[in-house]
Amino acid sequence: MNKLSHYDDAGNVRMVDVSEKLATAREATASALVRISQATLDIIREGANPKGDPFEIARIAGVQAAKRTSELIPLCHQIPLSNIDIEIEPGKEQISIRATAKTISQTGVEMEALTAVSVAALTIYDMLKAVQKDIVITEVRLESKTGGKTEYHRE
Protein backbone atom coordinates (compact mmCIF):
# COMPACT_ATOMS: atom_id res chain seq x y z
CA MET A 1 0.00 0.00 0.00
CA ASN A 2 1.25 3.49 -0.81
CA LYS A 3 2.14 5.72 2.08
CA LEU A 4 -0.67 8.19 2.74
CA SER A 5 0.54 11.80 2.88
CA HIS A 6 -1.79 12.90 5.68
CA TYR A 7 -0.78 10.14 8.13
CA ASP A 8 2.44 9.66 10.06
CA ASP A 9 4.19 6.29 10.51
CA ALA A 10 2.02 5.53 13.56
CA GLY A 11 -1.19 6.14 11.60
CA ASN A 12 -1.97 9.52 13.15
CA VAL A 13 -3.47 12.27 11.02
CA ARG A 14 -1.04 15.08 10.25
CA MET A 15 -0.68 18.12 8.08
CA VAL A 16 1.80 17.63 5.24
CA ASP A 17 5.07 19.45 5.97
CA VAL A 18 5.79 21.80 3.06
CA SER A 19 8.56 23.74 4.79
CA GLU A 20 11.27 22.29 2.51
CA LYS A 21 9.39 23.17 -0.69
CA LEU A 22 10.18 26.32 -2.66
CA ALA A 23 7.54 29.02 -2.95
CA THR A 24 6.51 29.24 -6.60
CA ALA A 25 3.75 30.95 -8.56
CA ARG A 26 0.70 28.70 -8.57
CA GLU A 27 -2.73 29.00 -10.13
CA ALA A 28 -5.85 26.84 -10.09
CA THR A 29 -9.21 27.15 -11.78
CA ALA A 30 -12.35 25.34 -10.65
CA SER A 31 -15.91 25.36 -11.94
CA ALA A 32 -19.45 24.50 -10.88
CA LEU A 33 -22.92 24.53 -12.41
CA VAL A 34 -26.16 25.62 -10.79
CA ARG A 35 -29.14 24.22 -12.65
CA ILE A 36 -32.23 26.44 -12.50
CA SER A 37 -35.35 26.95 -14.55
CA GLN A 38 -35.69 29.42 -17.37
CA ALA A 39 -38.39 31.17 -15.33
CA THR A 40 -35.90 31.76 -12.51
CA LEU A 41 -33.30 33.06 -14.98
CA ASP A 42 -35.93 35.46 -16.32
CA ILE A 43 -36.58 36.73 -12.77
CA ILE A 44 -32.85 37.38 -12.32
CA ARG A 45 -32.58 39.17 -15.69
CA GLU A 46 -35.61 41.34 -14.85
CA GLY A 47 -34.09 42.29 -11.48
CA ALA A 48 -37.18 40.86 -9.76
CA ASN A 49 -35.51 38.40 -7.37
CA PRO A 50 -36.87 39.18 -3.87
CA LYS A 51 -33.42 38.85 -2.28
CA GLY A 52 -31.62 41.00 -4.87
CA ASP A 53 -28.81 40.23 -7.32
CA PRO A 54 -27.58 36.69 -6.61
CA PHE A 55 -24.51 37.01 -8.83
CA GLU A 56 -22.79 39.89 -7.04
CA ILE A 57 -23.49 38.40 -3.61
CA ALA A 58 -22.15 35.03 -4.83
CA ARG A 59 -18.94 36.66 -6.11
CA ILE A 60 -18.29 38.26 -2.74
CA ALA A 61 -19.12 35.01 -0.92
CA GLY A 62 -16.74 33.07 -3.17
CA VAL A 63 -13.88 35.49 -2.51
CA GLN A 64 -14.49 35.34 1.24
CA ALA A 65 -14.65 31.54 1.16
CA ALA A 66 -11.38 31.23 -0.77
CA LYS A 67 -9.64 33.36 1.85
CA ARG A 68 -10.95 31.09 4.64
CA THR A 69 -10.36 27.70 3.04
CA SER A 70 -7.83 26.56 5.66
CA GLU A 71 -10.45 27.19 8.36
CA LEU A 72 -12.95 24.94 6.58
CA ILE A 73 -10.75 22.07 5.37
CA PRO A 74 -8.95 20.60 8.40
CA LEU A 75 -5.53 19.75 6.91
CA CYS A 76 -5.42 22.48 4.27
CA HIS A 77 -2.50 24.93 4.54
CA GLN A 78 -3.15 28.60 5.10
CA ILE A 79 -1.72 30.34 2.05
CA PRO A 80 -1.53 33.95 0.95
CA LEU A 81 -3.81 34.53 -2.02
CA SER A 82 -2.48 36.92 -4.64
CA ASN A 83 -5.81 36.98 -6.45
CA ILE A 84 -9.16 35.25 -6.64
CA ASP A 85 -11.33 35.93 -9.68
CA ILE A 86 -14.89 34.63 -9.91
CA GLU A 87 -16.88 34.61 -13.13
CA ILE A 88 -20.60 33.90 -13.12
CA GLU A 89 -22.33 33.34 -16.43
CA PRO A 90 -26.03 32.58 -16.89
CA GLY A 91 -26.83 30.13 -19.68
CA LYS A 92 -29.73 27.98 -20.80
CA GLU A 93 -31.31 26.74 -17.55
CA GLN A 94 -28.01 26.95 -15.72
CA ILE A 95 -25.50 29.29 -14.18
CA SER A 96 -21.81 28.56 -14.76
CA ILE A 97 -19.36 29.57 -12.05
CA ARG A 98 -15.60 29.69 -12.54
CA ALA A 99 -13.00 30.68 -9.96
CA THR A 100 -9.30 31.21 -10.55
CA ALA A 101 -7.04 31.47 -7.51
CA LYS A 102 -3.40 32.61 -7.58
CA THR A 103 -0.61 32.55 -5.04
CA ILE A 104 3.13 32.44 -4.60
CA SER A 105 3.45 29.70 -2.04
CA GLN A 106 4.88 26.29 -1.16
CA THR A 107 1.61 24.53 -1.92
CA GLY A 108 -1.17 24.83 -4.47
CA VAL A 109 -4.45 26.73 -4.57
CA GLU A 110 -6.79 24.01 -5.83
CA MET A 111 -8.75 23.89 -2.59
CA GLU A 112 -9.21 27.67 -2.59
CA ALA A 113 -10.60 27.63 -6.13
CA LEU A 114 -12.87 24.67 -5.34
CA THR A 115 -14.08 26.29 -2.11
CA ALA A 116 -14.78 29.55 -3.95
CA VAL A 117 -17.02 27.93 -6.60
CA SER A 118 -18.75 25.75 -4.02
CA VAL A 119 -19.67 28.65 -1.73
CA ALA A 120 -20.60 30.86 -4.69
CA ALA A 121 -22.97 28.10 -5.87
CA LEU A 122 -24.44 27.70 -2.38
CA THR A 123 -24.95 31.46 -2.20
CA ILE A 124 -26.82 31.47 -5.51
CA TYR A 125 -28.98 28.66 -4.13
CA ASP A 126 -29.66 30.69 -0.97
CA MET A 127 -30.47 33.82 -2.95
CA LEU A 128 -32.92 31.97 -5.22
CA LYS A 129 -34.55 29.38 -2.95
CA ALA A 130 -37.56 31.64 -2.37
CA VAL A 131 -38.21 31.55 -6.13
CA GLN A 132 -37.31 27.93 -6.93
CA LYS A 133 -37.01 24.96 -4.57
CA ASP A 134 -35.51 22.32 -6.89
CA ILE A 135 -32.21 24.05 -7.75
CA VAL A 136 -29.35 21.60 -8.33
CA ILE A 137 -25.66 22.31 -7.72
CA THR A 138 -23.54 20.01 -9.84
CA GLU A 139 -20.20 19.39 -11.54
CA VAL A 140 -17.96 21.06 -8.96
CA ARG A 141 -14.53 20.25 -10.35
CA LEU A 142 -10.95 21.29 -10.84
CA GLU A 143 -10.33 22.55 -14.36
CA SER A 144 -6.60 23.24 -14.18
CA LYS A 145 -3.64 23.82 -11.92
CA THR A 146 -0.19 25.17 -12.71
CA GLY A 147 2.96 25.65 -10.70
CA GLY A 148 4.47 23.25 -8.24
CA LYS A 149 5.57 19.70 -9.01
CA THR A 150 2.67 18.66 -11.26
CA GLU A 151 0.32 20.46 -13.60
CA TYR A 152 -3.21 19.46 -14.55
CA HIS A 153 -5.58 20.52 -17.32
CA ARG A 154 -9.01 18.94 -17.75
CA GLU A 155 -9.59 17.91 -21.34
Image (cartoon, grey):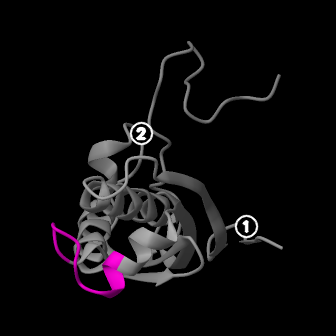
Amino acid at pointer 2: Leu
Alpha carbon separation for disc pair 2 and 1: 20 Å
- Tell me the number on the disc at residue 109: none
* Residue occupied by mark 2: 75
Residue farthest front in this picture: 39
Tell which of 77 and 137 is nearer to you: 137
User: Which range of residues does the magenta coloring cover?
Assistant: 43-52
In the drawing, what numbered circle is on residue 150?
1
Query: Is the residue marked by circle 1 packed among few (<14), some (14-19), or many (20+) residues within 10 Å?
Result: few
Element type where label 2 sits in the image: loop
Q: Nearer the viewer, residue 30 or 104?
A: 30
Res 40 → quadrant: bottom left
Extreme residue toward the left, this view: 51
Is 4 placed left or right of 41 in the picture? right
Give the residue displayed 55% in from the left and 64% down from the top: 32
Q: Residue at x 62, y 70 (%)?
A: 148
**Secondary structure beneath disc 1?**
loop
List x then y, in percent, for residue 105. Answer: 43, 71
Residue 108 appears in the picture as rendered: no
